[in-house]
Image (tube, helix red, strand yellow):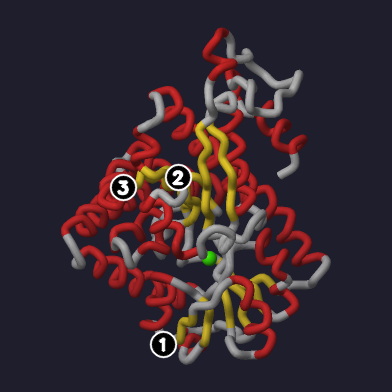
Amino acid sequence: MDRRRFLRRLGSGAVLAGAALGAGCKADRNAPGPQPQGAGAASFKPVKWKMVTTWPKNFPGLGTGANYLAELITAMSGGRIEVKVYGANELVPAFEVFGAVSAGTAELGHGASYYWKGKSEAAQFFSAVPFGLTAEEMNAWLYHGGGMELWAETYAPFGLVPLAAGNTGVQMAGWFNREINSLEDLQGLKMRIPGLGGEVLARAGGTPVSLPGGELFTSLQSGAIDATEWVGPYNDLAFGLYKAAKYYYYPGWHEPGTTLECMVNKQAFDALPGELQIIVSNAARVANQDMYAEYIARNNQALQTLVEEHQVEVRKLPDPVLARLRDLSAQVVEEIAAKDALSKRVYESFQRFRQQATQWSNISQRAYLNARSA
Ligand code: CA
């Protein structure tokens, strides 16, 4: 993100009204808030932190969201914490981020908790669950429904403090070169879809494959796969996936509100004075909200481009297909609960919240959106 854009955002953030942009940080005369004062301000030695990420450097939305969080921490701390961001493979490979922050190789890591299933089954509940919570509901569960406490408990054995640090909102079901008119059409469907969604597709008769983002386009174009999910219009347009597939299906049943994370090495976090701990935690809250807002805004724009300029055919998955995927998802998610005692507690908390959230969302968001469309 360029400096001007960052400062524009900074100026618009109410939470940042008191942010001090001082020594160690590129000060701007238009920046809000007081400058650090007194002997301490001039004499402090900045804490230098590294942030490793699971995203390519500057990847739209996810990588830029990590950059924004790093800049926020530096700006809000008045330069007392300097954060340098590393894209995937720059310091460690994408899937070694968790281990690197746990070991203290880096103090911060930006990723998604479902990548760490191999470390902890329970971790999967804190990013995206098929037919699980939306972005608003995830934030409600995490911040006011006991989710953050359970997440902290899940990461504590690894010496990590988790923070929610972004959300993609509802994703798209994906790009297909085969029409999906019935459950029959899922039989033998070779689709790139990772994680729990992939397991659900397998049980519905499909063949999930795992591929890094960079291989999606060629695999789809060559016919090596019949379909792929990625994120949503904003990221999918950038990848040019519309050139390799006929149909763009919705909704993203498998990732209804994917939470991105910032994990902090606990030893490094505990060594900070209290006010800097609060700054790091709240910078993540700002970044969490900002990424979601960016996704909504950019997805709206990108969808128009896909439909109007590239004549993409947008289709809804048939209701019987969604119903079957929903039943299978319930089975797959329930099986995680049987893996260990912590997973069972997280599952129960998540399910309880999902039930309550469904009741409220039905008479608030859903009722309103239906009324608006009518
Ligand atoms: Ca996805």
Asked if 187 appears above or below 131 in the picture, the reply is below
The residue under label 3 is which amino acid type?
A: Gly
Disc 1 or disc 3, which is closer to the eye?
Answer: 3
Earlier along the polypeptide chain: callout 2 or callout 1?
2
What is the distance, in whole Å, between disc 2 and disc 1 at their CAs? 42 Å
* Residue 316, image x, y percentages: 58, 71
* Residue 282, image x, y percentages: 48, 32
Earlier along the polypeptide chain: callout 3 or callout 2?
2
In-front residue for pair 367/95: 95
In-front residue for pair 271/280: 271
For residue 188, side relative to residue 75 (left or right): left
Asked if 222 appears above or below 81 in the picture, the reply is below
Q: Identify residue for label 1.
A: 205
For residue 155, side relative to residue 211 (left or right): left
CB of mark 2 within 8 Å of CB of mark 1? no
* Residue 207, image x, y percentages: 46, 86
Residue that sits furthest to the left in the current view = 341
What is the distance, in whole Å, between disc 3 and disc 2 at their CAs? 11 Å
Q: Secondary structure at mark 3?
A: loop
Q: Identify residue for label 3.
A: 159
Residue at screen point 64% across, 21% down: 22
The residue under label 2 is which amino acid type?
A: Glu
Q: Identify residue for label 2.
A: 107
What is the distance, in whole Å, between disc 1 and disc 3 at their CAs? 40 Å
Q: Secondary structure at mark 2?
A: loop
Residue at screen point 53% across, 82% down: 191
Residue that sits furthest to the top in the current view = 38
Residue that sits furthest to the right in the current view = 309
Residue at screen point 46% across, 73% down: 194
